[in-house]
Amino acid sequence: MNDHSDFQEILSPNRYFDNTFNLEAIKLMPGEYYVTKRDMVLVTVLGSCVAACIRDRVTGVGGMNHFMLPDDKSESPVAAGARYGSYAMETMINQLLKAGAKRSNLEAKLFGGGNVLRGFTVTNIGERNVEFALEYLKKDNIRLVAKSLLDIYPRKIYFFPASGQVMLKKLLHPNNDTIIEREAEYGARLKHADIQGDIELF
C-alpha cells in the first residue's frame, strides 16, 4: 500500500482575520483544501487550477479545494489525471461527511480553469481540469448550482460556506506572475506525486 505523505492536499495553514468581512479567513494555495462548520471565508486565487466549493445546503458545513490534474504525458495521462483528481475531490468530500454533511444534501460551485499557463502545450490544462470536475460531480450526483469556468483570466474567489455565497473577482490585469509561477511549480510537483493506493469512499 502506497503512502500519500510525500504529496497530498493538506489543511491550509494560511489563517488570518479579514477586516473587510469581519470574519476569520483561510487562504488556500494549490493542492490544499479546507472544511469548516463555522461562519468564515475561504479565499483562493485560480489560474488553470479549479476550485470546487461544496457544502451541505441544510447544515451549512462546507469546504473548498484548489487542484489541478497532472500534465504528465509519459503514460496514460487520462488514467493518472482521473486518479489524482478523484483523490483530490474525495479527500475533501470525506472530510465534509466526517464534519456532519450528508452526501444527498451536497451542492457545488465550480471556478477556474483559465488558460493562463504557457508551459502546458500538449493540451489546455485548464480545459482538462474543468472537464474532469464537471464529470466528477455528475458521476457523484452532486448538484452544480453555479460556475465560472475557462476564459483567459485568473480569478480570486471568496467562499462563505455558512451561506453558500461566493464572491468572484476576475483579475483582468494581474500585477505579477505569482499565480502562474505557483501553479507551474505545483504542476511540476504533481508529475512526481505518488497517487496510487485506494480512495476511501462513503
Image: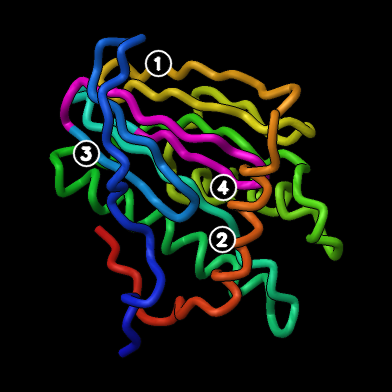
Q: From the image, which quarter does the C terminus lie in?
A: bottom left
Left or right of residue 158, residue 129 in this image: right
Instruction: Answer whether residue 42 is magenta in the image.
Output: yes
Q: Earlier in the sequence, mark 4 or mark 3?
A: 3
Mark whose residue sits in front, 4 or 3: 4
Q: Earlier in the sequence, mark 3 or mark 1?
A: 3
Residue under numbered circle 3 = 102
| Amino acid type, residue under disc 1 in the picture | Gln
Q: Is residue 57 visible?
A: no
Mark whose residue sits in front, 1 or 2: 2
Q: Callout 4 environment at 10 Å: few (<14), some (14 to 19), or many (20+)?
A: many
Q: CA distance from mark 1 to mark 2?
A: 28 Å
Residue under numbered circle 1 = 165
Mark whose residue sits in front, 3 or 1: 1
Mark whose residue sits in front, 1 or 4: 1
Q: CA distance from mark 1 to mark 4?
A: 20 Å
Q: Callout 3 environment at 10 Å: few (<14), some (14 to 19), or many (20+)?
A: some
Q: CA distance from mark 4 to mark 3?
A: 20 Å
Residue under numbered circle 4 = 133
Q: Judge whether 40 appears above or below 177 on screen.
A: above
| Residue at position x 16%, y 31% in the image | 37
Read off the magenta span.
Answer: 37-54
Q: Is residue 188 visible?
A: yes
Contact between marks 2 and 3 (CB within 8 A): the answer is no
Residue under numbered circle 2 = 186
Q: Callout 1 environment at 10 Å: few (<14), some (14 to 19), or many (20+)?
A: few
